[in-house]
Each structure stands twice: as C-alpha cells, then as structure tokens.
Amino acid sequence: MTDTTDDIAEEISFQSFEDDCRLLGSLLNDVLHREIGPQFMDNVERKRILAQSAVNMRAAGMEETAELLEKQLAMEISKMTLEEALSLARAFSHYLSLMSIAETHHRVRKARNVAYLSKSCDDIFSKLIHGGVPPEELYNTVCKQEVEIVLTAHPTQINRRTLQYKHIRIAHLLEFNERPDLSHEDKEMLIEDLMREITAIWQTDELRRHKPTPVDEARTGLHIVEQSLWKAIPHYLRRVSNALKKHTSRPLPLTCTPIKFGSWMGGDRDGNPNVTAKVTRDVSLLSRWMAMDLYIREVDNLRFELSMNRCNGRLASLANEILLKESASEDRHYESWNQPINRNHMKHYNHQGLALPAHLPAGADLPSCTECNDGDSKYHVVEFPGNITRQNSAENSSRKYEDGVVSLENSSLPPLGSSKVNKTNTSLVQRKLFAESQIGKSSFRKLLEPSLQRPGIAPYRVVLGHVNDKLMKTRRRLELLLEDLPCEHDPAEYYETSDQLLEPLLLCYESLQSCGSTILADGRLADLIRRVATFGMVLMKLDLRQESGRHAEALDAITTYLDMGVYSEWDEEKKLEFLTSELKGKRPLVPPTIEVNPDVKEVLDTFRVAAELGSDSLGAYVISMASNASDVLAVELLQKDARLSVSGELGRPCPGGTLRVVPLFETVKDLREAGSVIRKLLSIDWYHEHIIKNHNGHQEVMVGYSDSGKDAGRFTAAWELYKAQEDVVAACNEFGIKVTLFHGRGGSIGRGGGPTYLAIQSQPPGSVMGTLRSTEQGEMVQAKFGLPQTAVRQLEIYTTAVLLATMRPPLPPRHEKWRHVMEEISNTSCNHYRSVVYDNPNFITYFQEATPQAELGFLNIGSRPSRRKTSTAIGHLRAIPWIFAWTQTRSVLPAWLGIGAGLKDACDKGYKEELQAMYKEWPFFQSTIDLIEMVLAKADVSIAKHYDEVLVSEERRALGAELREELVTTEKFVLLVGGHEKLSQNNRSLRRLIESRLPYLNPINMLQVEILRRLRRDDDNHKLRDALLITVNGIAAGMRNTG
C-alpha cells in the first residue's frame, strides 16, 4: 500500500530524506528571519513545538494531554492579528511544499540507485518468463499493448505554474547536491542557489488572481509534455526495449509505442461554457504548433550529429534529389541575384530553408570549387550555374557567415503569428559568388550530371535539412491558421501526418544500419523516431466531451424545424429507428438555413470543428451521463452530418476518420445498465458494421468514478464499477467485438484515485486485454509526470501493470458466496451513505458550515463552474469540490462514509472469516480495503472535531459527533478485515511520512478554522480571503492531494 500520489512503492531512505528536510527547513528559516523578523519566527517555532508535542502525546496514548496542547495552540492562533495569521499560514505552507519536494526527490533517488527495481519491465518480464510464458508470446503482447494516458484540466492543481517550476529547480539542486565530486566551494554555491530559489518562492504571490481560461489549461498540459514527457519517452522506451531484448532476444520495434497520450484540456465542454468550438480548434492547432516546434529543435540538433558521408543508395538518391530541387530554385532566382540584395530577397531565400545545420564553423558547408579526386566515390561535386571568375569566388570564400536555417532558442510558445526569420544576408552573398564562379557550366549540363558533391555537406544533413524546412513551413502555416489569416501553402511543402515525417527519418536510420553505424542510428535519431511514433503531429490527441442532454436539445431543434416532432419526447425505439434510418442515408440532415439558439449552435459548431480536424488531431467523443443506445447514435448522426457538410464545402473528404464515440456511464443506475446499452448498440446492424469498418472492431466504453462515488458512496461505487466492467466485457464478447475500458479516475480515493499498479491489478479478469485508457487529473499530473525521472517510472508501472493484467489476469471471486457478501455490504453501505447525505435535512447546512466549500470558489483553480446547475443540492455539486472540501477538514468523509456500517453489518451476520479470506485471496476486495485504510490514516478526528466546535451551529453539532463516531467504527472494522493492529501497519513508510507532516499541517488546519470564523463575519475582507486560500494551499500540500 503506497501513498496515493506515488506509485513508486520502494521505501525511501529516511536518513537522507530527513537531512534534506532539515537543510530546506533551515534555509527557509533563514529566509523568514530576514523577511519577517526573528521575533515572529520565535512565534512560528512555538506553534510548531506545540503541534509536535500534541502529536507525540497522542502517539503515546496520552489523549487528554494532547487535547490540552491542541486547545492551547488553537487559543494562541485565535489571538493572532490578520497579518500574523497570513505570515504563519504562508510559512507552514512552504514548509510542507519543501517536504513534498524532498520526498519526491528521494523516491526518484531510490529508484535510480536500486539495482533491481520492483515492477520495472526487467522485473516483470523476468517473472513472466520464469512463470512459463513463452518469450514469443511476451514479445508479441508487449508490442501490441495500447495504453493511453489522458491528461485532464480537472481543477485540483492548487499551485501556480511559476511555483511548480521553482519547486522543480529545487529538486534538481537536491539531486546535484548528492554528487560526490562537489568541492567545498561548489557546496557553498549550491546552498546559495537553494537560498535564492526559496527567497523567490517566499516573495512570489502563491495565489492565482484570475481564473484560467481553457487555453491556459491546455498550455499547462503542453508544458508538462515539454518539460518532462518529451525527455521521459525515449528513456522509457529504451528501458522497455532493453528488457525485451534481454528476455526475448528481440528489441522493441522502433515505431512501436505501448503508451500514448491524450488530453481533455480544451475539449471537455461538459458543464463548462468557456470551452467553445473555437477554443477546441485553437487548442488543437496550438498542440500541433508545439509539436512542430519540438521536432524542429530535435532535427536541428540531429543535423550536427549526423555529419558522416557513408550512406546507402536510397538516401544518396534522396539527398541528390533535394539538392537538385535547391539548385533549380536557385536557377529561378538567378536574375534576382544579379540585383542589389535587399531584405525582401533575404526573406524569400530564408523561407526556402537550406539543408545545412545551424552554427557551423566558418565555411564548413561551402562546396569545393574542384571536382572530387576520388574516382571511386559515389558523391560528386554539385555544380551551380554562374558567370563570375573563380578568383572572385576564392577571394570571398573565406568570409564567415551564418547559415540561413533558423536556429531555435529553447523557448516555449511565442506570440501566435510570429515568424522567426534570420536577418543576415551573408549566406546569400556567398552562394551568389560561388554560383557565378562556374563559367561555362549550363543548367542543362548540371541536370545531366546530378551526382556531384559538395564535400562539406553530408547526405544526412541534406535530408534532415529538408525535413527541417518542411517542419518550419508547417509551423508557419499553423501560425497563420491560428491568426485566421489566408494560408495558401502547397500541401507538398508541409507535413500533415506522422507517417510523412517518419519516412525520411526511417530512411536515415536504415541507411546508418546498412553502413555498419547501428550505434549512431540508435542514438538521437532513434529517440526522435520514437517521439514521432508516440506524440505524432499533435503531442496529445484531444478528446471532446459533452453531456448527452445537449445532443438531444440539438436534435430537438432539428426535428422541430423539419416538422418531424420533438425528438426528446419520442420513446427509445422510435429514436433508434429515426437515428438508424438517417445514418444509413447519404444526405445531410441539418438544413444550411436552419436558425437555432446559441446553445444548439455551439453543439453543431463543435461537430463542424471535429469534421475539419478529424481523427488525425482528435481522439474520442465522450458522452457524459450516457444512459441509452440512442445517446451514442445521436452523436454518430451529428458527426456524420457535419462531415458531409464540410466535405461538400471542401470538395474533398474530411481529414482523418470519424471520431470514436464513447459512452460514459457515471451514476450507479447507469453503471447497472451499461452492459444492456452496449448489447443494444451492437445488435444494430449499422452500428456493428461501423465499429468493424471504421474502428477496427474496437468498442470503447468509459466508466466514471467521481459521480458514482458521490451518488452511492465509495464502496458501492467500487462494486458497481467492477460489475459494470464485467458486463460490458461480456456484451462485447458476445458480438465478437474487442473492448477498451476508459477509466475516469480522479486523484483522491473518493474519486477512484490510488496507486496505478494497485488499481489496474484489481480490475475484473478479461477487462484489461492489452488495452487501457485512464485519466490523470490536476495535481496528480504534476506529481506523477512533473519530473522526467518520475514520469519514466510511472510509464513503466502502467506498462507492467497492464501486461500482468493481460497475461496473468487477477483472480475473480473464489466463491459465489463472496459476491453475495459484497452485495450485502454494498446495499447496507449505500443505504447508510444516502440516509446521511441525501435524506438528512440538516446535512447540506452542516456541510456548508463545517467545510470551506463555499469559499473554495475564490481559488481560481479551474475554468469551469463548481456546480452543473445553480441549485445548492449535493446532486448538482461537482465531485471535485465535494471531495476537496472534506479533504480540507481532514475528515475525508466521501471516501469512507457508509463502509463501516456495511462491514459491521456483515460481521454481525457471521461473515468475519469470509471477509478476511476475501481480503487475502481477492485482489479487488483487498485493494478496496487497502485504499480505505490509506484514507483513514490521513483522516484526523480531533481536527475534524475542532472545525465543528468553532464553525458549526450548536443544533447541528450532534450530526458531526455521529459522523466522527462512524469514522472510528470504520477504522475498527477495516483493521479487523485486513488483520492489522493499526492503520498503515503494512506501510510504515507512509505512516512515517504522514507523521512527519503533522507538526506543520495541524496548525494550518487550526488557522483555517479561525480564518473561516472571521471571514464568515466579514465576507468582503480580501485579506482574510487570501489568508484562507493560503491555508487551503498548505493543507493540500500536506495531504498530498485535493480532489
């Protein structure tokens, strides 16, 4: 059992971890002494000591003493001024952030230094081979594996991006600090660098002052690719390839990618009116722009590396063909060369792009003025036409110049529409002088003798220079599209698909191999090919998501306009009959003259953008709150109609294919009907043929963890999800269709979060057959993929977990009786959960008083509203703020409410031994109990009680007392089932890490209570709001997750 934020299960070295914590804490103390004075720092230290003493007393069983110390701490905090409270909140919040940095660093350090890493490809491949799996079967299964990690913009990332970057720099400095060759002077300089970073953090406003836009959120996702995943992917794939070669004697094919990435940032419009069709288009184009920018950097670097002349015939022919085209272009511009050179000529010339690497030594790429003396050489001088003397050429050939190729800085997204143009014209002058020196050489003669060489130019550089030219033209085209400017590029001059980009790169790779230079081929070039295969032309394909009711509204408008009636008033069979009939037709359904309301227009515009972009840029179309087969066919029809209209306007087929349409089953009711809906869909001839023809016989189904948990409680949601997956898999098998399950998991346990390895290994047998999609959200994206080293480890864990689930599926329930026991626990748990959350008239008010839920709206952490509707009902509150609010109070109620009642009832009925056997032998049940135990280890009854005593009205405090009693009951029965004496008994590392945070975390909670008390009396006080939001940040850092 590991921390929810980290699947790297190895124990960390606490000695070195604590050393780093002391170092960072000491430096922060020094900064605070300078920034806020020694007197206040004494106050901060007193609060920390009181909190630490209370923790120690409670650990020793001295509960009354602990309570007295906590009351003293709360009383002192209540007397603080607002300025003091703000500084204390910031200080403890930064302490916790620095501890989290040190923890992540030491997990990476442990993984790097361990000779044999558990759950690595080498580890799991070895176990499978020794377990009797044939090497050929292992090889084929790995090569066919398809895992997609989908990054979402769900608003659970508290930290501003500028602070995230500063935290990453501190992690790098900690890594540098471990080098054994550091001198005393180096150490002092490193400490100064750390001091600077911590000072900058303290002086930086940690709060977002404006809500991010969907495009801002998309940029955040692209920065994760740029700063981490771009570096991690080649290293990860090398690990997979090396492990395969070791255990099967065959490396991973160069273009094989077991893992790819998707995104919802800019495509998830469910309940978010800020995500429009234009936003989706812009984000998709922006993602393509970033891909081109990253590829240009890599190709530019690669051209320096591949300076050799030996190549095979195919590459030589391609290089000569490119040089001929360049020469022909120079012929066309010969007349302009005889004119005075001006800026416009230079712009045009640079736009052509030369096949030479940037920043070469002076004259290194100038061709020789004499024939090649080596008669056996297959490379000859390429002659340029001209009419100036060799003497003039020689006099000028020694001039230094810069190549015309754009040299990219290591920057990120520039202002859209900008064009980076090299202003120097010296390269053009040199080429003019050289071309004019070739007296008596005609263009006709040059065409007859194309195999001539420019000795300074290697064939790989010629080819890669041409690739670079097309990439820059592609990037410029995208800038024009983003600026809505005319774009008349010839399609032959830019890249549209990854296959087009891979072709010359693979040719270079094959050439190097055929010439005995495999070691060169497997370096930077192989890394680039693997990146292209993984990231394609868009880095992350963008999913679209919309709620099913919005599609029904659009069809209502269409059928009403056509005098066919109101679509939403029809029964399911009539809907299916209408939809199937229209899908079989070849004419558009939506008249071009139709006038609709803005909401319907936005839906239709989205489908139009999807048709324009196609499956080359977009991934799946996800239907949230899906409940019927008609929900899927409605999207298929709207998609088909838009593609017919767009292709008619373009006069050619739409790019790419149709998007996969993915129903998302979220509520318990919908999960129970998921299998029936899929059976109904696949029984429709048109749909069955469509899946086989257009989607390779694959049906994708998404299951939602968040709303099902809010709907029925965590235990019932887990069990219903398990059964729904079983039923969906069975339904697809009945129709000979393969299924890919898409897991909408959040970061916290209450929203389906938890260690990836544990989650995948506890899925129903047969539900993970080499394919998997899963969301990674908010703070989990940064925690798992923010650093290249952690990203590599996470990618390996995804790979090995899916591989094991495919080749060695987890065991099903051993006895049918176990299912019966699960049903009884689930029913009792669900009934109790709903009786509290939905049936108790005092609960909503209690929730609003006891938590900072209402105040979380000030956080500006996401672009979408926190509620689907304006109602204050729990049902309309999104799952993220629901979990977030309870996490702040340390009760984490949604993750355990009802479970204690269910387990107690089962034990009272005599199922104790059965439950303990289920825990030992059934992976699903074990993981469910372990995750609940993990949550309980982070919960704190005394802190939750403090919130109630100060913030909750007296008439509702009894409800809080009942809930705390239930928390204790849940802990008792979870320990009983797991056979543990205390929480986190089987993960001492986690328990110790939690305990190390408490001296800073507990005072922040008490400070939050005091600030909430004051704010609710003075709700327009912006300084109080700031102080509250800083405590929210601190608690999120201490709990290591939010929503």
Image (cartoon, rainbow, N blue to C red):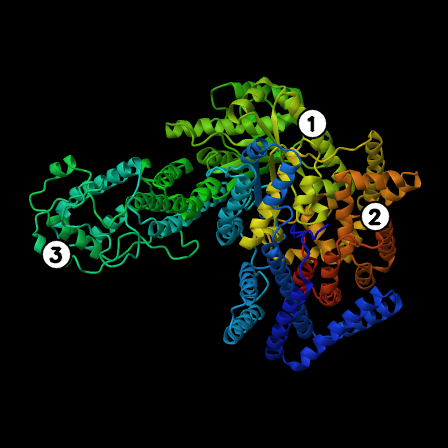
Q: Which mark is residue 675?
A: 1
Toward which corner of the image does residue 95 lie, by quadrant? bottom right
Name the kind of residue labelled 1 in the image: Gly
Kindly identify which residue carries mark 2: 974
Kindly identify which residue carries mark 3: 394
Q: Is residue 763 left or right of residue 596?
A: right
The local secondary structure at tag 2 comes to helix
Q: In whole angstroms, how far apart are the C-alphas of marks 2 and 1?
A: 31 Å
- In this rendering, the label closer to the viewer, 3 or 2: 3
Which mark sits nearer the N-terminus, 3 or 1? 3
Toward which corner of the image does residue 310 lie, by quadrant? top left
Q: Is residue 710 left or right of residue 394?
A: right
Name the kind of residue labelled 3 in the image: Ala
Residue at image position (42%, 57%) is: 411
Q: Residues within 10 Å of mark 1 (few under 14, many from 20)?
A: many
In the image, 862 versus 94, the foreground residue is: 94
- In this rendering, the label closer to the viewer, 2 or 1: 2
Q: Position of residue 772 (x, y in %)?
A: 61, 37
